[in-house]
Image: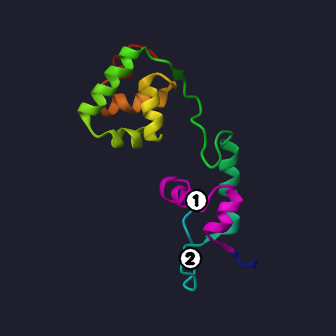
Amino acid sequence: MAKTEIVGYAEIADMMKISVPGVMKAAKTDPSFPEPITPPSMRSPGWDRQVMQKYVDQRGAKSAGRRGRPPAVGSKRYKLPAEVNEEIERRIRAAGTFAEFVALAEISDNALRQRFSGKTTWREVELERFAKRLGTTFDELTGIRP
């Protein structure tokens, strides 16, 4: 029987070609990230190398975008009129904290501000999440029928 080779965050980071904090984030947020099989002799979590390699290969097959993050596949982009962006921003600020919506969109606060200013386009998935959180529909929020 072959002995299981245990890998830690640093080895997984090399396998995934991302930083160690990126691996830690993936371990917390990606539901398909394998469960650790940490032996009692290890202080940090450990994973089976073969299981991790399979995960990395599957993730790589999905990811053609930024390193370490699968792209938002099939998400349309929308350039909204300034008055629609202003209305979305007003509703977001009235409904909760700016940080809550940054987390909901899974982008940085600067990226969200650029969407409000019209400098960058909105992803459909962001607008759908915002509409749901605001208790409305995509087309009511944007005036666009998806």
Q: Main secondary structure of the magenta part?
A: helix
Q: Earlier in the sequence, mark 2 or mark 1?
A: 1
Residue 107's place in the image compared with 122, above or below, is: below
The quarter of the image holding the N terminus is bottom right
Q: Say which quarter of the image contains residue 47.
A: bottom right
Q: Is residue 14 above or below residue 99?
A: below
Q: Residue at x 53, y 61 (%)?
A: 24
Q: Give the residues drawn in magenta, as a range.
A: 6-33
Residue 23: mark: 1
Nearest the eye: 131 or 95: 95
Is residue 139 visible in this depiction of the protein? no
Q: Amino acid at mark 2?
A: Thr
Label 2 crowding class (10 Å Cα cut-off): few <14, some 14-19, many 20+?
some
**Residue 16 sits inside the magenta stretch:** yes
Q: Position of residue 108 (x, y in %)?
A: 46, 41
Residue placed most toward the observer, 96 or 12: 96
Badge 1 element = helix
Query: For residue 97, what is the image quadrant?
Result: top left
The span from disc 2 to disc 1 (Cα, nearest Å) is 16 Å
The residue furthest left is: 94
- Residue 143 appears anywhere in the view: yes
SS category of the residue bearing label 2: loop
Apparent side of residue 96 relative to residue 106 in the rendered image (left or right): left
Q: Which residue corresponds to mark 2?
A: 38
Q: Where does the image place residue 49, in percent across and percent down from the top left?
A: 69, 68
Of badges 2 and 1, nearer the viewer stands 1
Answer whether residue 51 is magenta in the image: no
